[in-house]
Image (cartoon, rainbow, N blue to C red):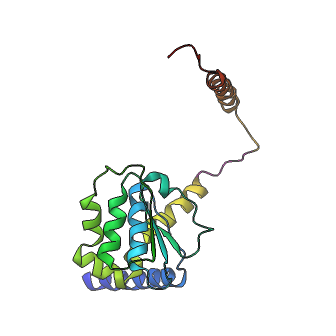
């Protein structure tokens, strides 16, 4: 029984690994912490593309859309500071020509657990060679959304009274907020 289980695991893992290797753009982080780990892993294990410039910083720089910045990598992490990205650059030894530092939160200390986990010896060595074990390649991240969309398909042309009522309430709340923020401050108050 154990031999059959191991054999089935090897076959399924081999098939999944093949799918991952044939679809290198396949990536599905599930939450902010995992997105940070994925971003760090992609920089650490990158061997194909050359990176001339790296952006390090806090959550502000993390949200920069990188599509118009060729050969530039955004190593900024949501909820963390600049030192995490700088530490990853130092540990990998991949020093780019330019390092751009966004200093919104300079006093945020380095998250030593984050970088220690990325460079933990055994997982580091295994993930370096087996792409399907990296954080953004977890099978449930691909399977679960497909199952959810099948189970929760909803005809958008049919709206319930509750949905109409919620939309009306939202519109009223939005107009109140717009009104509150449209008032100019009193210049006589110092």
- What's the residue at 33%, 79% (across, down)? 93
The quadrant where residue 159 appears: top right
Q: Which percent across, then down, holds residue 6?
A: 30, 83
Extreme top residue here?
A: 188
Q: Which percent across, then down, holds residue 48?
A: 48, 85
Q: Which percent across, then down, holds residue 35?
A: 43, 61
Q: Please name whichever residue, 14 or 170, is drawn nearer the observer in this view of the structure.
A: 170
Q: Is residue 165 above or below residue 91?
A: above
Extreme right residue here?
A: 157
- What's the residue at 49%, 73% (across, down)? 53
Q: Is residue 97 above or below residue 83?
A: below
The answer to whether residue 150 is left or right of residue 113 is right
The quadrant where residue 184 appears: top right
**155 in the magenta segment:** yes
Q: Please name whichever residue, 74 or 133, is drawn nearer the observer in this view of the structure.
A: 74
Q: Please name whichever residue, 150 or 117, is drawn nearer the observer in this view of the structure.
A: 117
Q: Please name whichever residue, 14 or 99, is drawn nearer the observer in this view of the structure.
A: 99
- What's the residue at 36%, 55% (across, down)? 81
Q: How many marks?
A: 0
- What's the residue at 63%, 68% (across, down)? 68
Magenta stretch: helix, strand or loop mostly: loop
Quarter the N terminus occupies: bottom left
Q: Which residues fall within the magenta stretch?
A: 152-156
Q: Which percent across, then down, holds residue 115?
A: 28, 65
Q: Is residue 46 above or below residue 117?
A: below
Q: Is residue 125 above or below residue 161?
A: below
């Amino acid at each position: 029984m154990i031999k059959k289980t191991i054999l089935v695991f090897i076959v399924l893992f081999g098939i999944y690994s093949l799918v991952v290797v044939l679809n290198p753009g396949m990536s599905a982080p599930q939450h902010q912490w995992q997105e940070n780990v994925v971003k760090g892993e992609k920089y650490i294990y990158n061997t194909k593309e050359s990176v001339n410039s790296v952006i390090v910083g806090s959550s502000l720089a993390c949200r920069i859309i990188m599509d118009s910045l060729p050969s530039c990598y955004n190593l900024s992490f949501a909820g963390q500071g600049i030192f995490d990205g700088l530490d990853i650059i130092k540990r990998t030894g991949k020093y780019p020509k330019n390092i751009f530092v966004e200093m919104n939160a300079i006093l945020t200390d380095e998250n030593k657990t984050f970088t220690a986990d990325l460079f933990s010896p055994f997982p580091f060595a295994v993930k370096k060679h087996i792409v399907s074990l990296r954080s953004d390649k977890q099978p449930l991240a691909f399977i679960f959304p497909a199952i959810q969309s099948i189970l929760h398909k909803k005809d958008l042309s049919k709206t319930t009274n509750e949905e109409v009522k919620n939309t009306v309430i939202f519109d009223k709340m939005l107009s109140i907020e717009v009104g509150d923020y449209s008032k100019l401050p009193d210049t006589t108050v110092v």
